Amino acid sequence: MNTNPFSRFVDRATSRLGRFISWLTLCMVLIGAYNAIARYLGRFIHTNLSSNLYLELQWYLFSLIFLLGAAYALKEDAHVRVDVVYGRLRSKAKAKINVIGSALMLLPFCVFVLWVSWPSIRNSWIVREGSPDPSGLPRYPIKAVIIVAFALLVLQGISQLLKDVAVLRGPDEDEEDGGEALEDVGARGL
């Protein structure tokens, strides 16, 4: 049970963000389907039914899903992991690996991306960067999502770090579970 107020707040916000992303995914799929149908139907009736706006909107929605979904994937432990040994470890050993990974890799990488991307994003907003394609969308708002996404990833990373530290400081749940399982076996006479 998570008793840390910061982690509870961040986890709730990330869960809400995950639900929002699922709706963005539906929108992206519908726009992608429209783009495909409009392209082929337009060829058939010799009329342009699509535009760069719809194509870029589909790309922007994919970018939002990918960028904003990173924090949700971290919270749900749905990120890619080479799970040759990790899955067989006890909860405290997993927590140690997670603490080391968060402190030495995840959080420093996120801070680095925030630091490196800020000048480019700031310049994009200053000039109100737009698409080079006719009827395209402005680029500066989607670039700003990079900052938002990595800030959210930092917050979720800190939340995960706090929860893993709590696991390390708490009782060894694996031994408790194993002990109860042995008591149950003894009580049933097996």
Image (spheres, grey):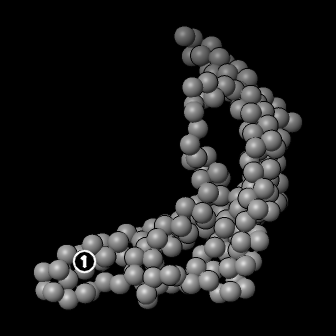
Q: Which quarter of the picture shows residue 172?
A: top right
Q: Residue at x 79, y 47 (%)?
A: 161
> Circle 1 sits in a helix, a strand or a loop, which is it?
helix
Residue 115 position in % (x across, y down):
80, 62
Q: Is residue 177 left or right of residue 65?
A: right
Residue farthest left in this picture: 44
- Image height of 185 relative to 154, above or below: above
Q: Nearer the viewer, residue 124 or 183?
A: 124
- Image height of 103 relative to 16, above or below: above
User: Quadrant of the image for the C terminus?
Assistant: top right
Q: Is residue 125 left or right of residue 70?
A: right
Residue 50 position in % (x across, y down):
31, 83
- Image height of 81 relative to 8, above or below: above
Q: Residue at x 45, y 67 (%)?
A: 25
| Residue highlighted by disc 1 | 39
How many callouts does the rendering have?
Answer: 1
- Image height of 5 relative to 189, above or below: below
Q: Nearer the viewer, residue 30 or 181?
A: 30
Residue 168 position in % (x across, y down):
82, 35
Dot 1 amino acid type: Arg
Residue 164 at least partly seen? no
Residue 108 position in % (x across, y down):
80, 50
Residue farthest front in this picture: 132
Q: Which quarter of the picture shows residue 56?
A: bottom left
Q: Nearer the viewer, residue 87 or 142?
A: 142
Q: Residue at x 70, y 83 (%)?
A: 125
Q: Residues within 10 Å of mark 1 (few under 14, many from 20)?
A: some
Q: Residue at x 66, y 67 (%)?
A: 146
